[in-house]
Amino acid sequence: GAVVSQHPSWVICKSGTSVKIECRSLDFQATTMFWYRQFPKQSLMLMATSNEGSKATYEQGVEKDKFLINHASLTLSTLTVTSAHPEDSSFYICSARRRQSNQPQHFGDGTRLSIL
Amino acid sequence: ILNVEQSPQSLHVQEGDSTNFTCSFPSSNFYALHWYRWETAKSPEALFVMTLNGDEKKKGRISATLNTKEGYSYLYIKGSQPEDSATYLCASRRMDSSYKLIFGSGTRLLVRP
């Protein structure tokens, strides 16, 4: 149980394109989903916390107009990188948590984004 | 300590060796410490969630201990196997953090056959 699907696995696109990444919890309801970014040889950095039916909470330094998050249902959150530029190239990964307080987060496989 | 720090950064051991790594985290307002195992091309897999000082958890050959007063956790692998090769991540959750986790950079373990 506790499977999270993230799609796509990798994207290569031109500068200026907007890219949407989906994160789905397949066998449980996720009250909260998280979006992380990882630069090479660094830790997972939390970008934003996404709660179903409400606005996402962004971490300091993360532009909410650049990284649009939608959490329309208890099983789906999307991250859209708007007008992507080469500096947005990175590894993006989502996670989801169940309602119970001390459950671990369950992760997707991640998305490798390369902007040319 | 304000950040979550893991050591060593990487570790190469021979099959059959036992090994351990360290995670240091802020001890103030501590709520929980998570350990994950992340194999290449897969998603991070939850190993343990630990909350109480002195907690010790075990899953097969892998075990972990927790000291919340001094802010550290050890992960032990007994009799390492090549399939244990992965990056081991720890993450701290604080009481005031709304379920947010702060991750360390991980320890990359390579077990040679």
Image (tube, rainbow, N blue to C red):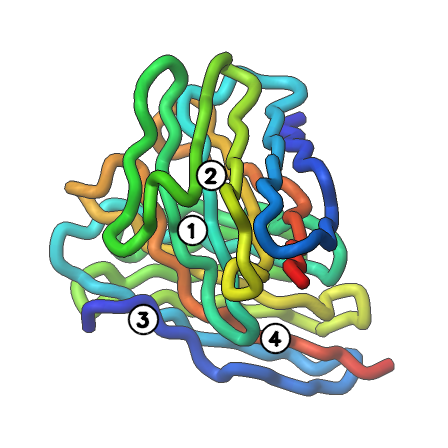
Circle 4: is it few (<14), some (14-19), or many (20+) Cα within 10 Å? many
Is there CB contact under 8 Å for labels 1 and 2?
A: yes
The foreground one among B8 and B77 is: B8
- State how far apart marks 1 and 2 are (Cα): 7 Å
Residue at mark 1 shares a chain with residue at mark 2: no
Q: Looking at the rendered structure, which numbered label has been put on residue B108?
A: 4
Identify whether B99 is placed above or below B30: above
Identify whether B87 is placed above or below B36: below
The disc, 3 or 1, on the residue closer to the chain's N-terminal end is 3
Q: Chain of mark 1?
A: B
Residue A73 horizontal/vertical position (percent): 50, 13
- State how far apart marks 2 and 3 are (Cα): 19 Å
Q: Looking at the rendered structure, which numbered label has been put on residue B34?
A: 1
Is there CB contact under 8 Å for labels 2 and 3?
A: no
Is there CB contact under 8 Å for labels 2 and 4?
A: no
The foreground one among A115 and A104 is: A115
Q: Residue at x 48, y 71 (%)?
A: A42
Residue A90 relative to residue B55: left or right: right
- State how far apart marks 3 and 4 are (Cα): 16 Å
Disc 3 marks a residue whose amino acid type is: Ser
Disc 2 marks a residue whose amino acid type is: Pro
Circle 3: is it few (<14), some (14-19), or many (20+) Cα within 10 Å? many
The disc, 3 or 4, on the residue closer to the chain's N-terminal end is 3
Disc 1 marks a residue whose amino acid type is: His
Q: Looking at the rendered structure, which numbered label has been put on residue A104?
A: 2
Image quadrant where residue B27 sits: bottom left
Looking at the rendered structure, the secondary structure element under dot 4 is strand
Residue at mark 3 shares a chain with residue at mark 1: yes
Residue B5 horizontal/vertical position (percent): 36, 73
Looking at the rendered structure, the secondary structure element under dot 2 is loop
- State how far apart marks 2 and 4 are (Cα): 21 Å
Residue bearing mark 3: B24
